[in-house]
Image (cartoon, rainbow, N blue to C red):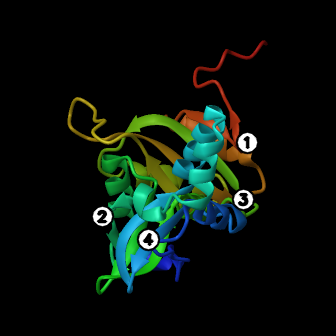
Amino acid sequence: MIVRNWMQSDPITIPPDMLVSEAKRMLSDNNLHALPVTDNGRLRGLVTRANMLRMGQFVLRTQSADEFNFFVNRLKVRDVMVRDPATVSAEERMDDCLLKGRQLGVAQFPVMQDERVVGLISANEIFQLAAHCLEAWEQRSGVTLAPLRLGPGVLGQIADVAEAAGAVLQAVYPVGRHGQHSDDGYPEKTVMLRFNAQAISQVTAALEAAGFPVCEAGGMPLSVERQPEEQ
């Protein structure tokens, strides 16, 4: 997955000499989280909705007519923008983009190609990507397994057990924190399965019988250590 396929293409851009009050209105009217600031097609900075909101709240708290007048009629984008913001390439992989955002604490990036802004990627696109990966709009069953050691062949065993129990697998997602490993060096991760099945309980029972505890089924949390049934 590359950034080009998930970014907002041809984003609205603003010039450095635009009034901050106008930039704030454009963010609100277009439900945007950020606006790249360009001059003759070159990226000069970035203004974000969060920064504009904080600035507006500060001006309101001062209850000063002069401060309000300055904010509305004189303050320019160049005075408040983030200069030389972090960017990503249109051909960059989405996982590299996510890692960069985490490392820098940045929630949106201008997307560049040939030194020009061709897109914008933000938390909205990340949520879209997550929904796509989880197939959130599909009417499918799903189970989440408790964290387990993913040694050789483990994912294959899980798939075999689920399909033998009647599941038609659509996706298997190992999910875990970076650097979380068992003593023998293999990663420890939660495993999410998405599938079609007539009886999700049958799939759940088969997975647990094979030694793969289920902590969620169909989005409902389950106790990993079940109490014995009354006789």
Q: Residue at x 41, y 58 (%)?
A: 79
For the residue pair 217 and 77, the one nearer the viewer reads as 77
Query: Mark 3 or mark 1, which is nearer to you?
Result: 3
Q: Residues within 10 Å of mark 2 (few under 14, many from 20)?
A: few
Q: What residue is disc 1 on?
A: 201
Determine whether the residue tagged by mark 2 lies in a helix, strand or loop.
loop
Between the residue at mark 2 and the residue at mark 3, the CA separation in whole angstroms equals 44 Å
Q: Position of residue 167 (x, y in %)?
A: 65, 57
**Residue 1 position (above or below residue 68):** below
Q: Residue at x 48, y 60 (%)?
A: 47
Q: Residues within 10 Å of mark 1 (few under 14, many from 20)?
A: some
For the residue pair 12 and 92, the one nearer the viewer reads as 12
Image quadrant in which you'd find residue 23: bottom right
Query: Mark 2 or mark 1, which is nearer to you?
Result: 2
Q: Position of residue 157 (x, y in %)?
A: 44, 51
The amino acid sitting under disc 4 is: Pro
For the residue pair 34 and 102, the one nearer the viewer reads as 34
Between the residue at mark 3 and the residue at mark 1, the CA separation in whole angstroms equals 14 Å
Image side of residue 41 versus residue 186, left or right: right
The amino acid sitting under disc 1 is: Ser
Q: What residue is disc 4 on?
A: 16
Image side of residue 217 versus residue 41, left or right: right
Considering only order in the chain, which callout, 4 or 3, is on the residue closer to the N terminus? Answer: 4
Considering only order in the chain, which callout, 2 or 4, is on the residue closer to the N terminus? Answer: 4
Considering only order in the chain, which callout, 3 or 2, is on the residue closer to the N terminus? Answer: 2
**Circles 3, 1 touching at the beta carbon (< 8 Å):** no
Q: What residue is disc 3 on?
A: 140
The amino acid sitting under disc 3 is: Arg
Q: For residue 193, say whether it is visible.
A: no
Considering only order in the chain, which callout, 1 or 3, is on the residue closer to the N terminus? Answer: 3
Name the image quarter holding the N terminus: bottom left
Q: What residue is disc 2 on?
A: 84
